[in-house]
Image (spheres, grey):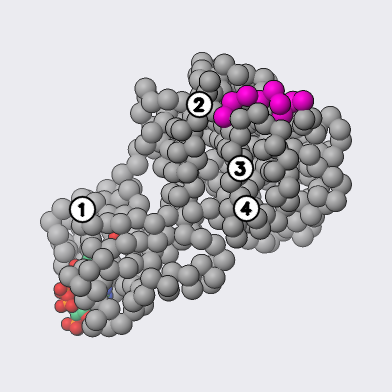
């Protein structure tokens, strides 16, 4: 059993804002769970397996909701503690036998794609305890041979749904960054999410610092391996730059595009603030170092950071800048989105890109910083899908 989330009952919807300020992020999703009589707001890692516990803010939908009764009796505040389990029925039998009072005989649907059951607080020392089990099938791992090693891609969603390729950013991975969006998109698409070479579940590829061409070749290997045609393509940050180049080279494979937090024309002064937090001496022992070790492997992350510093330092070279002619060759409908508080990229880059792409929409998101973890997942994923659905591919 691992701690999955803490439930906090709100007596006023505005309290959700307090948590946005406190945690310095937006909820990654909002969800109404009619069967529990609540509206929920989730903060944290987007439900990525093995990550830090989440915070679930609970608003009662009406006076009959158990959350409304709780607030009436005890006031707002900590409402329940939820543990993730892998076999909820087995845990229920074990706990019933041990004398705990279960509030239902079988699990019911809860928020965040979970089956849930509660233990009465009178049998758990005055704390309402929830057990929850994820109902999402694990994505299928595809190992793609590439230059003597392998790339990892994760397939999920209905097999015959339209294909969608999803690309993460530099030093990120599917699990760390894009998985939370995929949980929305996999209801509508057959999603293929790639971990770039050296990143996440892909092999280390330690020999040389990678180039844009190498990362583009990673996506081409996925397209060839799965035989993709007419696919949508989403890329975040570095993945967005790669997505643009893949779309330019392969108009038959890629039919629509969305890029978020992207830049394709760097100056020296923009590169410096990107590389300075990556220096290993300063990184050791930090939260980010722990995240990098979890994401890319304890024995691999330092070497990846070194190679990505070298990659980033070369970005201002003219061969790494996307020309306006190249932009004009990307004919697919494209959504270009960026936060107006992006710590790395000026909004003007997104505007420049939008102006030179022949068929693009621009979406500047107020108050949003660079990390994809900061987007309101459900609203963002729905908007991207909406633009894809309404775009004409001519
Ligand atoms: N934590 C601690 N104690 C709680 C509690 C909570 N969240 N909710 C109620 N209690 C206490 C009450 O204070 C009361 O104690 P006293 O008798 O000492 O005053 C006792 O439990 C019984 O409470 P009650 O108001 O008479 O309420 P009910 O028995 O009708 O319901 C409970 C209590 C826990 C069974 C009910 O709230 C319940 O079924 N909860 C589970 C469902 C739920 O909370 N859903 C919302 C979350 C949804 C989600 O996460 O998706």
Q: CA distance from mark 3 to mark 1?
A: 41 Å
Q: Earlier in the sequence, mark 4 or mark 3?
A: 4
Question: Residue under circle 1?
Answer: 108
Answer yes or no: disc 1 within 8 Å of ligand 1.
no
Q: Residue 392 has which mark?
A: 2
Q: Residue 339 has which mark?
A: 4
Image vertical order of residue 363 relative to residue 327, above or below: below
Q: Nearer the viewer, residue 49 or 111?
A: 111
Nearer to us: label 4 or label 2? 2
Q: CA distance from mark 4 to mark 3?
A: 11 Å
Secondary structure under tag 3 reads strand
Q: CA distance from mark 1 to mark 2?
A: 41 Å
Whether residues under marks 4 and 3 lie with C-beta atoms below 8 angstroms apart, the answer is: no
Q: Which region shows up in magenta?
A: 325-333
Secondary structure under tag 2 reads loop
Q: Quadrant of residue 319?
A: top right
- Check if residue 1 falls in the magenta segment: no
Residue 31 placement (x, y as % from top left): 35, 55
Answer yes or no: disc 3 within 8 Å of ligand 1.
no
Residue 107 placement (x, y as % from top left): 20, 53
Question: Residue under circle 3?
Answer: 362
Near mark 1 (Cα within 10 A), the count class, few <14, some 14-19 or many ≥20, is: some
Q: Earlier in the sequence, mark 3 or mark 1?
A: 1
Q: CA distance from mark 4 to mark 2?
A: 25 Å
């Amino acid at each position: 059993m691992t701690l999955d989330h803490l439930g906090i009952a709100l007596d006023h919807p505005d309290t959700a804002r307090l948590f946005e300020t406190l945690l310095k992020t937006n909820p990654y999703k909002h969800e109404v769970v009619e069967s529990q009589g609540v509206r929920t707001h989730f903060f944290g890692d987007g439900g990525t397996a093995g990550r830090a516990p989440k915070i679930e803010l609970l608003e009662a939908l009406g006076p009959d909701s158990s959350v409304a009764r709780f607030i009436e009796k005890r006031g707002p505040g900590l409402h329940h503690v939820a543990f993730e389990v892998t076999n909820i029925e087995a845990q229920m039998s074990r706990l019933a036998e041990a004398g705990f009072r279960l509030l239902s005989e079988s699990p019911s649907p809860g928020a965040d794609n979970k089956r849930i059951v509660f233990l009465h607080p009178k049998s758990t020392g005055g704390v309402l305890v929830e057990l929850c089990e994820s109902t999402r099938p694990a994505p299928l791992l595809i190992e793609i041979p590439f230059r003597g090693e392998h790339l990892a891609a994760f397939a999920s969603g209905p097999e015959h749904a339209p294909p969608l390729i999803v690309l993460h950013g530099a030093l990120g991975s599917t699990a760390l960054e894009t998985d939370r969006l995929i949980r929305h998109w996999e209801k509508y698409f057959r999603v293929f999410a790639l971990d770039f070479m050296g990143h996440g579940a892909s092999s280390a590829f330690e020999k040389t610092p990678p180039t844009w061409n190498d990362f583009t070749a990673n996506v081409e290997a996925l397209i060839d391996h799965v035989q993709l045609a007419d696919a949508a393509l989403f890329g975040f940050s570095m993945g967005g730059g790669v997505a643009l180049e893949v779309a330019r080279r392969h108009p038959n494979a890629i039919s629509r595009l969305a890029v978020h937090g992207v830049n394709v024309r760097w100056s020296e002064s923009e590169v410096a603030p990107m590389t300075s937090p990556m220096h290993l001496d300063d990184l050791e022992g930090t939260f980010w170092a722990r995240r990098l070790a979890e994401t890319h492997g304890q024995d691999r992350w330092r070497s990846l950071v070194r190679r990505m510093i070298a990659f980033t330092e070369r970005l201002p070279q003219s061969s790494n800048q996307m020309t306006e002619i190249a932009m004009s060759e990307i004919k697919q409908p494209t959504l270009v989105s960026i936060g107006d508080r992006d710590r790395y990229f000026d909004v003007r880059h997104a505007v420049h890109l939008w102006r030179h792409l022949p068929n693009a929409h621009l979406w500047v998101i107020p108050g949003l910083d660079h990390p994809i973890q900061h987007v309101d997942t459900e609203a963002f994923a729905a908007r991207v899908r909406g633009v894809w659905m309404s775009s004409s591919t001519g």
